[in-house]
Image (cartoon, coloured by chain):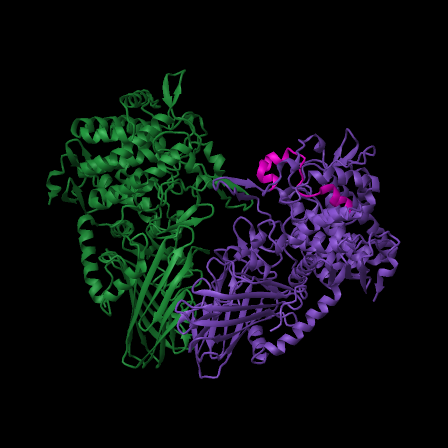
Chain colours: A purple, B green
């Protein structure tokens, strides 16, 4: 028995029911097609059991639609000499659970004394195949230590899966006989069919008694065998999934796929799975010497992004909580394009392309939203699901008083999301040189979003300028504000770049430019209008101080000494209330600094410093937005404050592993995971791009001995190896660059 | 085979999936402990399966709490020579379903041709025992007609029961072996335990193969046997329920109870069940000669009230939709006290006492509501569940636009409910002479409600009078009104009667009066204040015209010619919108006439006629409130307009049987059922009470040949037999009164 490698394995050495939901999130595994939370095969009271499969959304009250928890593949009831094995009974003598990030293998070893005193060793393993994404496998080895008796296994697929009490599935059909079973079911409203086919195999030295329990909506395979003390049996359960999103006959596909798998299937499925994982890590691994916590946290973050990333499906994207929990119901935010996508753009551009294609396929939803709000073009939804229509809840029950409802405004007025999609498109284009994608998909998004901004701009006669009123910027502590600098800057940026894109098109691809002109009724006069709006958009920059005012009147809001409120264990919004926080200058996340991060050409060094110094002490870094710390870390790096940067970075790195915000049980903070990668590569690693290509200005924390990372630029993979020779100058990079 | 008696049986001769939910409601059976909707044992797609057990509420979003659908006793999967029997497959050659209202036996005969062409006769029967309320039984006789083959039966208890997709149950334990099984489960939030113990028995001429499928949360008993064409088998499934509301060890109780039942149990349980039903009908049957539709509709209404009436439980009451559907989530409204309760008060006072005790036990909830709103005493909730706290939803999603929420005000300002409970107490007291109940329970309610009214009254300086502002009266088309005549009159009535009750107490039971004075801190000064408020409550009566203005400014609202809108198929509120209807004079139900009905001494004949003539054409009789038609019928009777009365009466009588409002699928209109009884007895039968006792002034519809009904007065049962000799005068009653 090998000890788990602490640089690659997340390991838990005791079972703590108090942290059940947190550990279920941490031990999530997946393969980009589906993910399964780290619940026990045998179940546990109050578990938050869930398997989510990309794109399987169904209607639900309040949040409109959610990823439906599918009938899961883990279920395994184990009876040991007649006693029901479950960790809430008897005594746990030994417990070790380990997730190997190299290959997504989750193992659990349990020595359990039953209420009657029988001691059994149970060794579980599971993986969702990365090479054959429809296949999931688990196996368990059972060894009675101090008794002989019957072992009985029930392995079913339960069609009664629910989302925290809400059921999405209606039965279509099932069977269970001999070694296998299948279940065919369908979401109630969205009518997505799901078929699961399962097989159970058992190796034992004694006779095996087999039964098939074809209970309605819960077909189950049963095995019984005798075991003597010290002997072991091994059980394998393999489950194959297909949905009507994959094929028009998901049941046939699942049954046939299962029939084609060898029996047992583990060994033959394991090898290609592991090889695929090796290839994944070759493109994106990050090595940090001298900081084991940072090392494992970064790999954990990348693992989370990798298991949530759609590899064969360009109609889905990664939700704010990946596929790892019920938080935000699987909805997709700007978290994907701005926080998670750069990792894929720079290490796995094919996945980035899928994620951007999701926005292309949902362009009609964004058009509907713009039209419904009285605007032109495409206004992307703040929260997005299957169709691109807005699915942000408009009213939610107040957390403290169930008779009151709270109005959620982000779906109405947090409008920068549309620009962020264009920004991500540009970033992808620059990094990959994928003209084809821009020509056939990206340009249409760009033009339609530019249209939206032009129609949303409001002319201020008095000042002869365009303004954007009644918006929410990235800092959501302040809503219904006018002229949010971030929003205005990105409205301008989108319009300018849409015009540039159009010029490029007409120059280099006149036929395609003509197609767009016809399809979108794009006329020169409209381009002229974009130009006019872009030139006259108000941007609240004070050349005297170098400060950008986050929005009109921000500097007049009440200034709060955040230090004086320490130590605290809740957000400023919880302390002051929604309306109270709105009246202060406290930020949920660094809004202006985020702008400076994304558009570095906007501010000179002096101005950047001024804004950093002003906004940093006014930001709720600990309990504000989980999107903030990684960006704050990068900006600190840019200003040479590595130690500050490291503090912010570790706040992001610990978001889930240490559950610093107390809500990791709802699922992985996907934006934080993506931000961690950006903080390492763009912050400490100092990678940046300009018109000449890429550059490195490393700013390693002093205790890091070495940083190595990969990226891909214009189709070429690079490995950057940065030994820490002490404080870097921008010239000190030469010995550290290795091109592959 | 006997034909169902059309005077006692509801019969359906074909299976119409389009009316599935309606027929599920109509064929609900129950025993006052639980009720089960008329779904098929074998299931059917999109069914609205439900068994509700009194008092088993659990938390849910929006409506706060709801009766949890319990794991049901009906489930029976039938495989005929390997083919799954279900009416959505194959062909239904014959279908007859019949509910015998005499004894609550539901039977169904189906001749079914399977997809493979096998024809089988299946004869189902079920009942929920009225003599042994924990026991439910079903049996089915299966006869293959044109084939021989294996019959396989799966009979389970499925712990995954849900309320239209929302799950309330968490598993505690289970077993299945040999002939029986049990399941132990618990509601998630309210933590009410439920245990179900079930047994399956089968009579066959061939060998029977038995299995027990102990699938998690769905234990199932399985039987297989061979059948030759023309041979029959009979299967019986008996399920016993206990909850932690009944006993501290519901599982032990259920298992023991089941063990004590003979096997098979049908015959020995059927006899006492049927005898109990006979006794029930002896106290309350209504016979109508010359009008078969009215006859069956009245019995159907009484049956619905009887199966929902708690016989052993004084901590529950009957919800607006009885126990027959998901509508209003099991919540209790004034429908119970004013519409349903009179039937029990006058035929089964012990049940009436239970229902009134429910309000006594929930007095603290009403006190909390008063306190939360800044008032004194007890303010009963508009919608009530387990605790007496207000459970009216405050915000519900708009039916047409899911992003909008509609504020429901009834829980805040429809305040007459508290007076209605006092009114029902008085009615019960008068009819039964049950001083003990008033002394020990009723008086406390009365005093606390009087207190509420005194603290809610607002002094109008200008007019030197007390007023009630910002209320909703029974007519809910008009909200936020001032001085609703109904509310003001009942505020005064409650205060006056509280004072009378107090005088009676001090005179006849000074010790008990003293106890209340101490317990409730009741001082003479407060009584004086009640007197003062009662005397000065404004009542909007115009002695010139005899008209009562429904609320301040009602006569100034827009008058609408309802005739001009005919024919219509939706309510006036749907046509004009919530705010639009509020601006008109159109009523959802007759508000002032309802007042005149409940307090007949308030208006003389001239004034009654004036108000009837004014308000009747302004009432939305067809699609307004289902509470209206029966009251309108009674008032028409009082004014000698029997033919008008009959039209309104039949509108109430058809509410569920003919689904005239299109929403019977949500459950029985309990108030309408109770109103039907009142319309027959107090309207056509002309029974009324005054200080001298009871009197009869019959007003039979001309085509009725005879009306017979029962009632109980001061402990004595009476049977009234009214042959129709043509128009009655009030003197014509002598030959028709029969005292038992």
- How many numbered badges does the structure rendering display? 0
Where does residue A470 sit, x and y in percent of width and height?
Answer: 67, 37
User: What is the quadrant of residue A722 in the picture?
Assistant: bottom right
Above or below for B115 versus B333: below
User: What is the quadrant of residue B697 in the picture?
Assistant: top left
- Which residue is more in the foreground, B684 or B368? B368
| Residue A628, magenta (yes or no) | no
User: What is the quadrant of residue B267 in the picture?
Assistant: bottom left
Q: Residue at x 22, y 42 (%)?
A: B345
- Which quadrant, please, contains the C terminus of chain B? top left
Q: Is residue B272 left or right of residue A338?
A: left
Looking at the magenta stretch, what is its main secondary structure?
helix
Where does residue A584 sit, x and y in percent of width and height?
Answer: 65, 34
Above or below for B263 versus B571: below
| Residue A575, magenta (yes or no) | yes
Where does residue B500 sit, x and y in percent of width and height?
Answer: 23, 27
Q: Is residue B313 left or right of residue A650?
A: left
Residue B474 seen from this side: no
Residue A170 seen from this side: yes
- Which residue is more in the foreground, B494 or B719? B494
- Which quadrant, please, contains the N terminus of chain B? bottom left
Boundaries of the magenta span: A571-597
Where does residue B613 sit, x and y in percent of width and height?
Answer: 33, 31
Q: Is residue A520 left or right of residue A134?
A: right
């Amino acid at each position: 028995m090998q000890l788990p490698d602490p640089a690659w394995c997340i390991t838990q050495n005791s079972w703590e029911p108090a942290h059940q939901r947190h550990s279920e999130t941490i031990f999530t595994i997946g393969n980009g097609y589906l993910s399964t939370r780290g619940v026990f095969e045998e179940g546990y009271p109050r578990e938050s059991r869930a398997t989510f499969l990309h794109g399987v959304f169904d209607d639900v009250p309040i949040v409109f639609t959610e990823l439906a928890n599918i009938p899961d593949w883990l279920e395994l009831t184990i009876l040991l000499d007649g006693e029901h094995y479950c960790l809430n009974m008897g005594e746990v003598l030994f417990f070790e659970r380990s997730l190997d990030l190299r290959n997504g293998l989750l193992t659990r070893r349990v020595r359990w004394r039953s209420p009657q005193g029988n001691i059994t060793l149970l060794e579980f393993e599971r993986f969702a195949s990365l090479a054959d994404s429809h296949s999931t496998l688990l196996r368990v080895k059972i060894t009675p230590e101090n008794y002989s008796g019957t072992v009985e296994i029930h392995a079913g697929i339960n069609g009664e899966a629910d989302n925290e009490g809400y059921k999405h599935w209606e039965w279509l059909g099932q069977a269970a006989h001999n070694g296998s079973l299948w279940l065919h079911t369908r979401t109630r409203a969205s009518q997505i069919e799901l078929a699961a086919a399962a097989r159970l195999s058992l190796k034992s030295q004694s006779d095996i008694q087999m039964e098939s329990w074809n209970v309605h909506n819960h077909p189950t395979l049963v095995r019984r065998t005798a075991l003597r003390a010290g002997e072991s049996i091994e059980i394998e359960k393999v489950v194959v999934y297909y949905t009507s999103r994959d094929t028009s006959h998901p049941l046939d596909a699942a049954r046939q796929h299962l029939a084609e798998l060898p029996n047992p299937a583990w060994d033959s499925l394991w090898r290609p799975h592991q090889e695929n994982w090796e290839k994944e890590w070759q493109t994106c691994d990050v090595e940090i010497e001298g900081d084991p916590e940072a090392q494992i946290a970064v790999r954990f973050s990348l693992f989370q992004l990798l298991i949530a990333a759609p590899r064969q499906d360009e109609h889905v994207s990664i939700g704010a909580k990946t596929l790892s929990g019920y938080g935000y119901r699987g909805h997709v935010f700007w978290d994907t394009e701005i926080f998670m996508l750069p990792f894929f753009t720079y290490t796995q551009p094919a996945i980035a392309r899928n994620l951007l294609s999701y926005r292309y396929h949902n362009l009609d939803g964004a058009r509907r939203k713009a039209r419904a709000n009285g605007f032109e073009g495409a206004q992307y939804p703040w929260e997005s699901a299957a169709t691109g229509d807005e699915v942000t809840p408009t009213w939610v029950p107040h957390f403290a008083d169930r008779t009151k409802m709270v109005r959620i405004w982000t779906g109405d007025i947090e409008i920068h999301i549309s620009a962020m999609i264009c920004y991500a498109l540009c970033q992808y284009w620059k990094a990959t040189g994928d003209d084809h994608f821009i020509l056939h998909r990206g340009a249409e998004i760009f033009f339609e979003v530019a249209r939206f901004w032009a129609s949303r701009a409001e002319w201020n006669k008095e000042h002869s300028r365009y303004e954007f009123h009644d918006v929410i910027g990235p800092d959501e502590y302040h809503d219904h504000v006018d002229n949010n600098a971030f929003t205005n800057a990105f409205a301008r940026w989108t319009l300018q770049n849409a015009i540039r894109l159009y010029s490029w098109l007409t120059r280099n691809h006149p036929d395609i430019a003509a197609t767009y002109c016809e399809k979108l009724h794009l006329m020169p006069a409209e381009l002229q209008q974009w130009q006019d709006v872009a030139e006259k958009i108000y941007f609240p920059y004070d050349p005297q101080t170098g400060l950008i005012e986050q929005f009109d009147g921000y500097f007049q809001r009440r200034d709060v000494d955040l230090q004086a409120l320490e130590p605290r264990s809740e957000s400023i919004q919880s302390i002051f209330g929604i309306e109270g926080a709105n009246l202060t200058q406290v930020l949920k996340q660094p809004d202006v600094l985020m702008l400076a991060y994304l558009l570095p050409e906007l501010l000179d060094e002096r101005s950047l410093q001024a804004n950093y110094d002003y906004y940093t002490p006014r930001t709720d870094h600990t309990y504000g937005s989980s999107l903030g710390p990684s960006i704050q870390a990068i900006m600190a790096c840019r200003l040479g404050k590595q130690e500050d940067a490291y503090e912010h970075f570790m706040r992001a790195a610990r978001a889930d592993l240490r559950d610093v915000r107390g809500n990791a049980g709802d699922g992985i903070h996907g934006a934080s995971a993506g931000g961690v990668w950006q903080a390492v590569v763009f912050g400490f690693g100092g990678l940046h791009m300009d018109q000449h290509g890429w550059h490195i200005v490393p700013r390693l924390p002093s205790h890091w001995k070495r940083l190595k990372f990969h990226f891909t630029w214009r189709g070429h993979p690079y490995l950057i190896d940065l030994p820490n020779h002490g404080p870097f100058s921008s010239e000190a990079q030469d010995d550290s660059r290795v091109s592959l």
